[in-house]
Image (tube, rainbow, N blue to C red):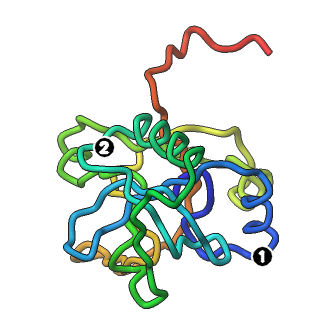
Amino acid sequence: MLVGPSFGADADTASCLDDAGLTRIARVRSAEGPASFVRVVDQEGGVPTVVAPLGDGVVDLADAFRRASQRSDAGDAADATWTIAAGERSARICSPVKLPQAAIDAETHVVVAAGLNYAAHAEEAGGGDVFLFPKPVEPSAPYGRVVPPAGVTLHDYEVELAYVLLADIDLNDRPTR
């Protein structure tokens, strides 16, 4: 889920999200199977339970946010909604972006991770500065099963916080403040 957690959140986090009044979107499979962007209409503990489809053909993340904000202002009465039962989460809630392993392997898209990005982790690793590195793995869906590749004997589980850039950035034109 974007603009909110994609995992079971505690009551304080869910309350904070509700109080912020932010439009939240997710990628969810319909009952027929295809995944599409939806606006989160209702949630329980930060997990989407009722969503409203944003319409056919919305594949651009920025467009999804625009449409979700416009629909949110218009209210929910005109929107068709889907209910997501607790037992359906792993099959219906998808990763926020569709980024297949083939695109990562072909280096047409890249996932960039930050290492030693908080004090406890840096201390645990013996110190050092924050660094960026490519993470050549397809994003997994919330609640979905993670299966390690053949031959992997030690599987490290991590929870990642991600930002999806909606526009290109120029690293030479950084903000001064």
**Would residue 167 be found to the left or right of residue 116 on screen?**
left
Q: Decide which of 11, 111 is in the foreground and name it.
A: 11
Image height check: is 114 above or below 47? Answer: above
Q: Name which quarter of the figure residue 82 lies in.
A: bottom left
* Circle 1 residues within 10 Å: few <14, some 14–19, many ≥20: few
Query: At which x and y percent is residue 120?
Result: 78, 58
Q: Earlier in the sequence, mark 2 or mark 1?
A: 1
Q: Which mark is residue 11?
A: 1
Please tell me which residue is depicted at 74% across the width and 61% down the height of the picture: 18
* Identity, as a three-letter code, of the amino acid under mark 1: Ala
Image height check: is 137 above or below 173? Answer: below
Image height check: is 12 above or below 103? Answer: below
Residue 129 seen anywhere in this rendered image of the structure: yes
* Circle 2 residues within 10 Å: few <14, some 14–19, many ≥20: some
Please tell me which residue is depicted at 64% across the width and 77% down the height of the picture: 44
Q: Name which quarter of the figure residue 13 lies in.
A: bottom right
Please tell me which residue is depicted at 60% across the width and 47% down the height of the picture: 115
* Identity, as a three-letter code, of the amino acid under mark 2: Val
Q: Residue under circle 2?
A: 58
Tell me whether circle 2 and circle 1 mark residues in contact (CB < 8 Å).
Answer: no
Q: Which mark is residue 159?
A: none
**Would residue 114 be found to the left or right of residue 167 on screen?**
right
Alpha-carbon distance for marks 2 and 1? 31 Å
Q: Decide which of 19, 90 is in the foreground and name it.
A: 19
Query: At which x and y percent is residue 124?
Result: 73, 61
Label 1, secondary structure: give it.
Answer: helix
Residue 140 seen anywhere in this rendered image of the structure: no
Query: At which x and y percent is residue 3?
Result: 60, 51
